[in-house]
Image: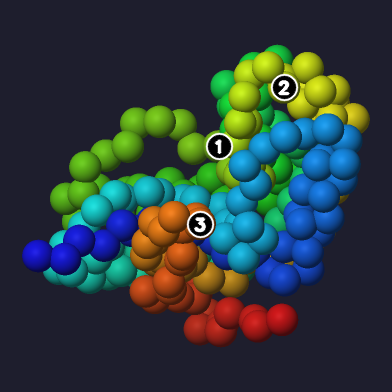
Amino acid sequence: MTLHRTFIAVDLEEGVRAGIARLQEELRSAGARLRWVRPDNLHFTLRFLGELPPAQVARAVVATREAVAAVTPFALTVGGLGAFPSFERPQVIWVGTTVGGEALTALARAVHEALARARFPSDDRPFRPHVTLGRARDDRQWGELVRALHRYRDVIVGDQQVLAVTVMESRLLPDGPVYTVREQVPLSHGLNPRKE
């Protein structure tokens, strides 16, 4: 049986993607040596589901529709650099939200609850709204990386409306993952996701 590596995400508008690509370039110029996420793969992950058979992917789509049925569109400002596990030991570099983080967290909670009702295993890790920019290649480079992170810590990347949630499939290829939209689920009021 074919399995599909599946996750649920909020996609980024083109202007925000372009802003993050510029930020990645500035960090690179400032000495940050990372394995960078390609701009077309940037997103906010609401829930990673792992390898699913087709019937479970269909259940995940139904649960996502349920989760967003009562959620109205909202504004996000993408900005503020962070790192996991910490700024001093940066292994994963990300940009978060300065406006709309609470609404995004509530949306993730609605998705988690709908998935739980659909009998998907729960994920107990706390949700932290972030878009992964890159992963550290080598801890010997942390000094330069930490300096670059501090320089751009309060960066503002851009604004967008969250109009939909996307159920995505990820295929892992040698030159990086390729994402395919399984279903884009508009938030309530029948709004269609805006294409830039």
Q: Residue at x 39, y 56 (%)?
A: 172
> Tag 2, which secondary structure?
helix
Q: Crowding at label 2, few (<14), some or many (≥20) Cα neighbours within 10 Å?
A: some
Q: Position of residue 175 (x, y in %)?
A: 50, 57
- Residue 85 in percent (x, y) is at 57, 22
Tag 1: amino acid? Arg
* Image marks 2 and 1: residues in contact by CB distance under 8 Å: no
**Given contact means CB atoms under 8 Å apart, are the residues at marks 1 and 3 in contact?**
no
* Quarter of the picture holding the N terminus: bottom left
Q: What amino acid type is highlighted by mark number 3?
A: Asp
Numbered mark located on residue 175 in the image: 3
Could one spot residue 59 in this view of the protein? no
- Mark found first going from the N terminus, 1 or 3: 1
Which residue is the site of mark 1?
Answer: 128
Q: Residue furthest left?
A: 1
- Mark 1 against mark 3, which lies toward the viewer? 3
Where residue 168 appears, as percent x and y from the top left, is 41, 65
User: Is 11 placed left or right of 54 in the picture?
Assistant: right
Residue located beneath label 2 in the image = 141
Q: Earlier in the sequence, mark 2 or mark 3?
A: 2
Q: For label 1, count other residues whose C-alpha is less than 10 Å away and answer few (under 14), some (14-19) or many (20+).
A: some
Q: Point out the residue furthest to the front here.
A: 174
Mark-to-mark CA distance, 1 and 3: 27 Å
Q: Quadrant of residue 174?
A: bottom left
Q: Is residue 109 above or below residue 84?
A: below
Q: Residue 23, relative to residue 82: is it above or below? A: below
Query: Where does the C terminus fall, quadrant-wise?
Result: bottom right
Of callouts 2 and 1, which one flags the residue occurring earlier in the amino acid sequence?
Answer: 1
Picture quadrant where residue 35 is located = top right
